């Protein structure tokens, strides 16, 4: 598994929310399979260079949404989704096209994500 | 008579050791910091360079200690505290250099930070096979403490006052060192145990820090993970080298218990193990991460040349050690049967013949690699070879050293009064002429062989000049070392010979224009 998330400290969205939304998206898209383990709060906070409380809050909200569950011994585990999102092929193709355009115009991933986030409702 | 440790040590020893350690640590810190902060260099490049320098410094500092001080009793008595310092040196330097290395990376504030969601465990980047080998070495080193503890103290007959002593005639290490006394195993064993414990503790501590430390800023999570694996690989290889060093010292000291036969087996075993550790690089090529996938033709030509040089020089170092061992055995074997004079003659002859053969093989193998490149060039569209002479001063110096070496081979008594040429002049003449002919043939070949790389004329000249310089270097070095080792055993002459062997080609052959390198495609 090479799933990665990023945190932009200059973005208007709070860091905990960025972490929460990215992990939630990865779970909804099936990138994070049910039963897979997430890194510990301390490890992820160290890697992202944020406070442990920030990651803890993101995990807590994800747990409240029923996406993950924390167990004392097993760590943080991704839950089984009752109704996984079925991403339409056209949408995947559109995203692929978007990436190609971004690459052609030398727009990096962070800028592209920011552009997408700007249209978020 | 043999005296136990002098327990009266002042604070001066601690102060002196701490001060020298602090000075060296400061220099290491400043150097690593400067490597990590180099302006205008990509972060990944800096991380690779920083990690390499750290491992290199740690290797040299942790393996350059003479553990025979544990048992030798010098004229000026060493205190117990000094010996404890020596025992902790390897582990201490290993820990110190790696800790400095791990915490000299600049804190580059980044607004966008990336992290992998892969759960990081202590075992993820840990090289298990290498860890197992180091574990076996650690067990072997620990087990050898038992025979070490059984060795009794030895005092020479003159110091003993005629009292009977144990038979230590097979204690070759002592004979080589010329020691007339050594400490008992009961005192030496704890020092070895402390040394092993220090190294293992330092390795465990650093491995833990490597696995748990914050990722380096400026490089991706994947590269950080790879870097952790590289750090661990180098750390374990370094630890393995130190343990081999310790085991070798334990073997030397415990010779009277283990026997000389075991010493012979272990010596070659350690050379093989050392080589295995030397080449046990990480599975992925971190050094290539971030480089252009399509290397320039000049880069590939230079890499080919460097790889050949690296392999052949490594072979020469191993060959030198094997020749030394073989000649020592021959001398010992013949000395018992025919006396030292005849044994010395036979040993010197063998030394000259084997060394000459090693140099000839070096040149032939190097020519063979050039022949391989030549064959590859013939598959494409070969061009007319372009070559130029090296600077005149290079030929002048090479001629001077070669002539001096040949002169010393024939007239050893000119430098060392009383030294006799034990080798037949006919054999010497054959070896010298053979080497000169092979070198001349090699130089002719390097000027006439084809090169398969699409490089500029300037770069092709550079390649041929580097090969020619290497031939002159090995020839000058060998002809200076041969009399130095075989007839004189003079440290200064040997040092000059080794120094010649170590001259890098970049000091002599000017590298082609850097701007041209960027424009040349593969």
Image (cartoon, rainbow, N blue to C red):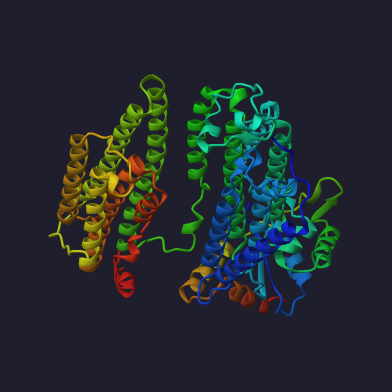
Residue A82's x, y, as percent? 77, 51
Residue B200's x, y, as percent? 69, 43
Q: Residue at x 35, y 54 (%)?
A: B306
Q: Residue at x 39, y 47 (%)?
A: B490
Residue B15 in view in this figure: yes
Residue B67's x, y, as percent? 61, 42
The answer to which of B215 and B386 lies nearer the viewer is: B386
Instruction: Tell me the quarter of the image containing the C terminus of chain B.
Output: bottom left
Residue at the farthest left position: B384
**Picture mark count:** 0
Residue at the farthest top position: B337
Determine the image quadrant of residue B148. Answer: top right
Q: Is residue A73 left or right of residue B84?
A: right
Q: Is residue B41 left or right of residue B104?
A: left
The answer to which of A91 and B505 lies nearer the viewer is: B505
Q: Residue at x 40, y 44 (%)?
A: B317
Residue B122 in view in this figure: no
The answer to which of B84 and A17 lies nearer the viewer is: B84
Vertical relation: B444 (above or below) B171: below
Residue B480's x, y, as percent? 30, 49
């Amino acid at each position: 598994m090479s799933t990665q998330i990023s945190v932009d400290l200059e973005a208007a969205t709070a860091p905990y929310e960025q972490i929460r939304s990215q992990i939630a998206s990865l779970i909804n898209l099936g990138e994070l399979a049910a039963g897979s383990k997430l890194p510990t709060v301390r490890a992820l906070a160290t890697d992202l260079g944020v406070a442990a409380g920030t990651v803890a809050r993101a995990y807590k909200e994800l747990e409240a949404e029923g996406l993950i569950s924390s167990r004392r011994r097993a760590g943080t585990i991704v839950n089984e989704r009752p109704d996984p999102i079925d991403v339409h092929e056209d949408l995947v193709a559109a995203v692929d096209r978007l990436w190609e355009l971004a690459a052609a115009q030398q727009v990096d991933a962070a800028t592209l994500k920011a552009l997408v986030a700007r249209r978020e409702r | 008579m043999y005296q136990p440790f002098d327990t009266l040590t002042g604070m001066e020893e601690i102060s002196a050791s701490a001060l020298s350690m602090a000075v060296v640590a400061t220099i290491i810190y400043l150097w690593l910091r400067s490597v990590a902060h180099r302006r205008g260099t990509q972060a990944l490049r800096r991380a690779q360079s920083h990690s390499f320098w750290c491992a290199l410094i740690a290797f040299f500092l942790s393996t350059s200690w003479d553990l025979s001080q544990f048992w030798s009793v010098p004229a000026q008595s060493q205190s117990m505290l000094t010996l404890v310092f020596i025992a902790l040196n390897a582990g201490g330097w290993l820990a110190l250099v790696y800790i400095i290395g791990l915490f000299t990376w600049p804190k580059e504030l980044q607004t966008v930070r990336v992290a992998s969601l892969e759960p990081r465990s202590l075992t993820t980047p840990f090289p298990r096979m290498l860890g197992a080998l180091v574990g076996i070495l650690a067990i072997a080193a620990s087990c050898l403490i038992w025979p070490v503890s059984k060795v009794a103290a030895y005092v020479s007959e003159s110091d003993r006052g005629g009292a009977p002593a144990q038979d230590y005639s097979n204690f070759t290490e002592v004979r080589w060192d010329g020691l007339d006394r050594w400490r008992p195993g009961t005192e030496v064993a704890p020092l070895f145990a402390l040394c092993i414990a220090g190294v293992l503790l330092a390795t465990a501590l650093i491995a833990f820090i490597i696995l748990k430390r914050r990722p380096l800023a400026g490089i991706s999570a994947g590269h950080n993970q790879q870097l952790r694996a590289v750090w661990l690989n180098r750390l374990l290889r370094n630890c393995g080298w130190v343990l081999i060093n310790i085991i070798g010292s334990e073997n030397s000291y415990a010779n009277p218990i283990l026997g000389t036969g075991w010493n012979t087996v272990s010596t070659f075993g350690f050379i093989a193990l050392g080589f295995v550790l030397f080449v046990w690089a990480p599975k992925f090529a971190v050094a290539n991460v971030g480089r252009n996938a399509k290397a320039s033709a000049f880069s590939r030509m230079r890499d080919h040349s460097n790889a050949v040089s690296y392999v052949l020089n490594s072979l020469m170092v191993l060959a030198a050690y094997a020749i030394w061992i073989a000649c020592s055995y021959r001398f010992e074997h013949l000395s018992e049967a025919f006396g030292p004079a005849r044994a010395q003659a036979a040993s010197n002859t063998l030394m000259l013949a084997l060394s000459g053969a090693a140099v000839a093989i070096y040149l032939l193998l190097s020519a063979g690699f050039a022949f391989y490149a030549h064959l590859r060039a013939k598959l494409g569209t070969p061009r007319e070879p372009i070559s130029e002479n090296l600077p005149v001063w290079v030929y002048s110096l090479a001629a001077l050293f070669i002539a001096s070496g040949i002169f010393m081979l024939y007239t050893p008594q000119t430098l060392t009064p009383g030294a006799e040429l034990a080798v037949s002049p006919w054999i010497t003449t054959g070896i010298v002429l053979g080497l000169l002919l092979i070198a001349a043939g090699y130089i002719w070949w390097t000027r006439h062989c084809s090169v398969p790389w699409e490089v500029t004329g300037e770069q092709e000249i550079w390649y041929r000049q580097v090969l020619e310089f290497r031939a002159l270097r090995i020839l000058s070095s060998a002809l200076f070392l041969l009399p130095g080792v075989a007839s004189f055993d003079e440290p200064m002459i040997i040092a000059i010979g080794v120094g010649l062997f170590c001259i890098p080609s970049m000091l002599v052959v000017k590298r082609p224009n850097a701007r041209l390198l960027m424009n040349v495609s593969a």
